[in-house]
Image (tube, helix red, strand yellow):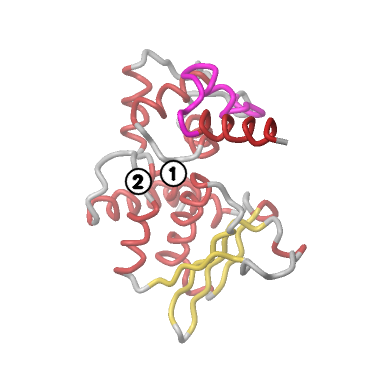
């Protein structure tokens, strides 16, 4: 099997899981993935424990997968924001489906370019935002291959209410040739989003509370 065949197989697997569990849009929640975990009897934990001292060895890990006589356990770094945590949950699920013969896998920056990890990234991206929906969305916006801008991805995410992280969208845009590799690096996505659509109400409220607290001193 070639690499491209392997990657396409991971996409097909993700689409099959989406179909089996009624995921029909790019708006996938943690609760959806937990529901799938439950069906497969997979335990999911946050790590390190709240009161545990920081461990340098695991500081840069996003997630981990373990499979033994007690069953399957997926661990997600508790410091990850919502969207990256969701992506990691899908990434580790691929390891359960395809790689559990390896018994344990640690996933982080140090091994992200290994084939098995790239396969998990592609699976996760397809689980959260299928290629077909991604391509259709950009084409409807008039975006041509090789010309996708950061603003285009922000619009696409907003229109589709996609829950995939911007990092996941960038990888997908590059993999599908909508953006040259590296052209979407170093973008401050939250700042760009606020410039385009304004500050979300909950953030305005948080800032107002913070300012009021400062004034009370």
Q: Quadrant of the C terminus?
A: top right
Identify the residue at the far front of this view.
216
Image coordinates for residue 78, horizontal then vertical, percent: 58, 58
Q: Is residue 36 magenta?
A: no
Where's the N terminus, which quadrant? bottom left
Name the element at disc 1.
helix
**As rendered, which of 196 and 96 lies closer to the eye?**
196
Residue located 53% across and 76% down the image: 103
Task: Check residue 185 for magenta coloring.
Answer: yes
Give above or below for 64 relative to 30. below
Name above or below for residue 75 compared with residue 11: below
Q: Secondary structure at mark 2?
A: loop
Mark number for residue 28? 2
**Of the numbered discs in the image, which one, if any, rests on residue 125?**
1
Q: Which residues are magenta?
A: 184-202
Percent of width and height locating residue 64:
56, 65
């Amino acid at each position: 099997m070639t690499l491209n065949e392997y990657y396409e197989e991971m996409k097909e697997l993700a689409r099959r899981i989406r179909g089996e569990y009624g995921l029909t849009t790019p708006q996938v929640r943690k609760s959806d993935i937990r529901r799938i975990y439950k069906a497969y009897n997979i335990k999911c934990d946050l790590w390190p424990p709240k009161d545990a001292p920081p461990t340098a060895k695991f500081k840069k890990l996003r997630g981990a997968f373990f499979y033994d006589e007690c069953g399957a356990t997926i661990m997600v770094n508790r410091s990850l924001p919502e969207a990256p945590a969701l992506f990691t949950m899908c990434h580790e699920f691929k390891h359960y489906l395809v790689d559990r013969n390896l018994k344990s896998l640690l996933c982080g920056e140090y091994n992200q370019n290994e084939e098995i990890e790239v396969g998990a990234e592609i699976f996760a991206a397809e689980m959260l935002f299928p290629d077909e929906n991604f391509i259709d969305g950009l084409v409807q916006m008039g975006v041509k291959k090789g010309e996708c801008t950061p603003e285009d991805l922000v619009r696409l995410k907003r229109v589709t209410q996609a829950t995939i992280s911007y990092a996941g969208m960038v990888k997908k845009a590059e993999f599908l040739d909508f953006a040259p590799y590296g052209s979407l690096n170093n973008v401050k996505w939250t700042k760009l989003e606020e410039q385009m659509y304004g500050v979300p109400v909950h953030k305005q409220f948080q800032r107002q509370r913070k300012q009021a607290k400062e004034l009370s001193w």
